[in-house]
Image (tube, coloured by chain):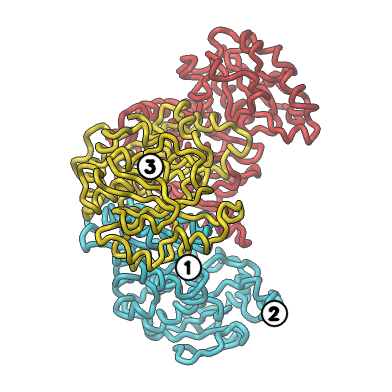
Chain colours: A cyan, B red, C yellow
Amino acid sequence: MKHLLSIDEVGTDGLRHLLDLSDHMAEINRRPVPKVPALRGKTVVSLFFEDSTRTRLSFETAAKRLSADTMTFSVSTSSVNKGESLRDTIETVAAMGVDAFVVRHMSSGVPWQISRWTEASVINAGDGWHEHPTQALLDCYTIRTALNRPDGFEGLHIAIVGDIKHSRVARSDVWAFAALGARVTLVAPETLLPPSLDGWPVDVAHHIDDVVSKVDVLYMLRMQRERIHEALVPSLREYTSRFGLTPDRAGRLRQHAIVMHPGPMNRGVEMAVDPSELPGSVIAQQVTNGVSVRMAVLFQLLGSGSGLAGEAS
Amino acid sequence: MKHLLSIDEVGTDGLRHLLDLSDHMAEINRRPVPKVPALRGKTVVSLFFEDSTRTRLSFETAAKRLSADTMTFSVSTSSVNKGESLRDTIETVAAMGVDAFVVRHMSSGVPWQISRWTEASVINAGDGWHEHPTQALLDCYTIRTALNRPDGFEGLHIAIVGDIKHSRVARSDVWAFAALGARVTLVAPETLLPPSLDGWPVDVAHHIDDVVSKVDVLYMLRMQRERIHEALVPSLREYTSRFGLTPDRAGRLRQHAIVMHPGPMNRGVEMAVDPSELPGSVIAQQVTNGVSVRMAVLFQLLGSGSGLAGEAS
Amino acid sequence: MKHLLSIDEVGTDGLRHLLDLSDHMAEINRRPVPKVPALRGKTVVSLFFEDSTRTRLSFETAAKRLSADTMTFSVSTSSVNKGESLRDTIETVAAMGVDAFVVRHMSSGVPWQISRWTEASVINAGDGWHEHPTQALLDCYTIRTALNRPDGFEGLHIAIVGDIKHSRVARSDVWAFAALGARVTLVAPETLLPPSLDGWPVDVAHHIDDVVSKVDVLYMLRMQRERIHEALVPSLREYTSRFGLTPDRAGRLRQHAIVMHPGPMNRGVEMAVDPSELPGSVIAQQVTNGVSVRMAVLFQLLGSGSGLAGEAS
C-alpha cells in the first residue's frame, strides 16, 4: 500500500488491517504522553485546495503523535495562483523531501493525478463528490468500537440519511460498510440521489420514518443550504420534516442504536435535536477516532514496521 | 487551577506562585538550549478570533520551550464561518485530544463560556474590553524584577495612562497591581474612563503632569486612532499634549522609575519620545518576560509537577 | 559570519566553505532519518512580506531537520498593518528569544536594515531586485555536483537568459558564479538589462542562439507577464522566439550541458520545452539542494560547532 486514494483500493482485508492498527493507535492516544517516535524524520505536507480546518488539524495531530514533521501548503498564497501548473508545484514541493501529501481538492480525481507525479505517498482527504477514505475508516472504527463488532458488520443495518448525491462521505462509507458485511439503506429525496445507483450495494428509502426505528446505525449527512438555491429541496423546513432527526424520532431509535454525523452539523436542519441529549450519539467519538485512524494510515504508508514500541524520545 | 480566565480568580497567593514559577522559567530561557520536556505529548491550540501576532507567537514560543505541540486554529478559514456553532467547533477540536485552548476573542466572556464546553484548560489571551490576565502577569513580573521587589509591591506608586475604558490590559493590571500591594492611579480624560469606578482600588488624575514626577512605574496604554472618530478625544495632538510621554516629561521621571507599554506603540502619540532613549524603559523586557510567564501558566495548568528538571530529550 | 545578506559579503572563501558544509547536509538528507539535533532549542522565524511558499517551505524544512523550532510571522495579519513601525515589530519579536529571521521583502535593503535592529541573525531570502543569496548558493551547489566541480568553476561557461534587470536571482548568481571562476554571459533584450553593467563580471548577448550550443550551463529566468504590460517586451511569443528554450534549441545543447531554472516556470514562455524530457535538466535537483544549502547556512550562523555528529534524539 503506497497511497490511500479510495476505499475500493484498500479492499476488505486492508480495511480490517487498518482498523486493527487503529486499535493500537487508540491505545497510544490514551497514554499520559501520547507520542511515539515511529515517523521521526518523516515530513507530511497538508495540501488543502478547499478549507477544512477539522480534517487538517486531525491529520496534523496524527502526524505529530507519530513524531513526523508537518507543513501546511497554503494554496491561496502559493505559486499555483501565479499560473504555475499543479504538476510543477507538486514536483517542487516533493523535491524538498516530502514523504506524504495529504490532499483535499474540490475536483474528483486530483489526489490520484498527484500520485502519478511524485514518489511520495498521497492520502486523499476528500476530492470533490468522489471519496473521503479516512472518513470512512473512522466511521467504521467508531461503529466497530461503539457496537463491539471487531469481526465485521454482518447483521448490522445502517441508514445514511441526506444529500447522498453530493457527498464523498456517503460514497466512501457505502463501500466500506458493505465490505465489512453491513446492510446499507440510503434515505434521501430523489433529487439528492446520484443519477444511477447501478452496482451500489444498497437499498433506498425516501422518508426517515421508514428506517428510524429499525436501524443499528443512523448516519446523518450535513444538509448544505446551497441545495435550496439549486431547487433540489423545496425548503429547509420541508427537508427537516422528512429527513431531519427530531426529538420525536430520536425517541423511536432502538435502545442500542448509535447516531453519527461527519460534521459540521447544521443544528435545526438535519440535526433538529441536541446531540448532547442523545444517549446514542457517537459524534464526538468519531472525531477522537479520526486521529487514531489517521495515525494508522500514516504509519501504514510511511512506517518501517518498527518504532511503535517505545515512547517518543 | 484548571483555567486562567481572569486575574481575580487567580488570587494573591496564586499570583505570587505564578511569579515564582516564572523565575524558574526565566532561568530556563537563559540556558544555551532553552527547552525542557515538561509538556511533551501535550497539545496547545491557539484559537484567535482577533488577530494578535505578538500574543500568539509568545504563547507558541512558550509552549514549544516546554516541548508541547502547538496548533493554530485560524478562525477566518474555519467552519465557524460556515454557520457551525462555536460550541460545536470547540467540542470537535477538543475531541481530537487538546490539552489547552489559548483564546483571544473580541467579546467579553467568551473564554469563560468555552471553558464550560471542554475538559481542556482554557487560557484567556484577551477578551473584548474585559481581561488579559497573562499581560497582567508579565507586567507584574517585569516590575518585580526591574524594581527588585520579590516580596510584593507595597509602597510602589503605579500610574496607568490612557484609554482605560476600552483596555482589558488596564482592567487586569489594576487588580494584579493592587493585589500585590501597589497604589494605582489612573490617568485619563473622563471620556476614556469606565462609566463607574465603584470598587476599583484606584485613584484618578486627569493630566499626566500630575503623576509623572511622582511614580515608580509609568504604564502607557496604546491610543487607538478610532477614539478620535468616536469623538472621545478631540485630536491626537490634544491627547499627546495632556497624556503623551514627551521628552520633557521623560526628563521629569524619578531616577529609578520605569516606563512600560503593552505594545504595539503609537509613536508620536502616547509615546512621543523614542523608548530606546529612555533609560527607564522596560518595554523589551516585558516582551521577553511574556514568554517566561506564559511558560509558567502552561506548566501550572498542564504540568504534572515533574519534568522541569532535565533538558528536553 | 553573523548574517547572510548578500553573496558579496560571503566572499569566495565563505562560498567554498558553505558549499562544503552543504555536502555534509546532503549526506544527512540521504539518511533514513534525516534529522540531527544541531540547532535544538533555537528559534527561526520566517518573516515574509512577499509570498513565496517554496522558499518558506525550504527554509522551514531545513530548520526542522536541524531540530530548530520554526515560526511564521504572517505580515498580512500582523501589527505592521496597524501602523506599528517595522522596527518596533522586529524588536518585539526578537525580544521573545528569536535566533534567526528569514526575511523576504519587496524592497531592496530591508534585510540589511533589520539586521541593525536585532541581535538575531538575519538571512536575506530575497529583497526586491537586489539579492537572493541562498538561491545563488543552491545554484552553485547544483552546478558543482551535477558537473562534478568541487574545486571551482574555472573554464565553465554559464549563460543566464531572461529578465536580468528585475531579477535578484541573476544579481546574486552573477557574483557567485564569477567568484568561483566561471565565465558568465547574460542573454536578454536591452530593455531587460540593468541601465548599467559597469563592474559586472559578464559579457552580453541578445539572442539565445548565440550561446545555446556553447555553454556548460544554461540558466533560464522566469519571464513575468507584467513585462508585456510595461512594454518592455513586445509579446510573449516574440520573447520565446528570441529567448525561450524550445525543443529545437534543446537539441543543440552540448551533451554534458545542464539546464537550470529558479522556478516557478512559465511553461510555453521561457520553458517552451517539457523539462522532464530534457536530459540535462537539474531543476528538481536545485530544489532538493536548496534544503541542504539552507541547512548549511542556518548551521553556520546558529550552530555551535558540535551537534552534527549524532542523530536527533
Subunit of mark 3? C
- C-alpha gap between disc 1 and disc 3: 70 Å
Determine crowd level at label 2: few under 14, some 14-19, many 20+ residues with C-alpha closer than 10 A: few
Could you confirm whether marks 1 and 3 are on the same chain?
no
At horizontal 56% and vertical 65% (from top left) the residue drawn is A264
- C-alpha gap between disc 2 and disc 3: 67 Å
For disc 2, the marked residue is: A231
The spot of residue B110 in percent (x, y) is: 61, 46
The spot of residue A272 in percent (x, y) is: 63, 70
Q: Which image quarter: residue B199?
A: top right
Rendered view: A252 above or below C94: below
Query: Which tag is nearer the camera, tag 2 or tag 1?
Result: 2
At horizontal 37% and vertical 33% (from top left) the residue drawn is C8
Residue C171 makes an appearance in the image: yes
Determine crowd level at label 1: few under 14, some 14-19, many 20+ residues with C-alpha closer than 10 A: many
For disc 1, the marked residue is: A282
Query: Which tag is nearer the camera, tag 1 or tag 3?
Result: 3
Subunit of mark 1? A
Q: Residue C202 carries which label?
A: 3
Q: Would residue A54 appear left or right of C67 to someone viewing this image? A: right
The spot of residue B122 in percent (x, y) is: 51, 44
At horizontal 26% and vertical 39% (from top left) the residue drawn is C38
Query: Which tag is nearer the camera, tag 2 or tag 3?
Result: 3
Rendered view: B131 above or below C265: above
Determine crowd level at label 3: few under 14, some 14-19, many 20+ residues with C-alpha closer than 10 A: some
Rendered view: C170 above or below C82: below
Amino acid type of the residue that numbered disc 2 sits on in the rendered structure: Ala
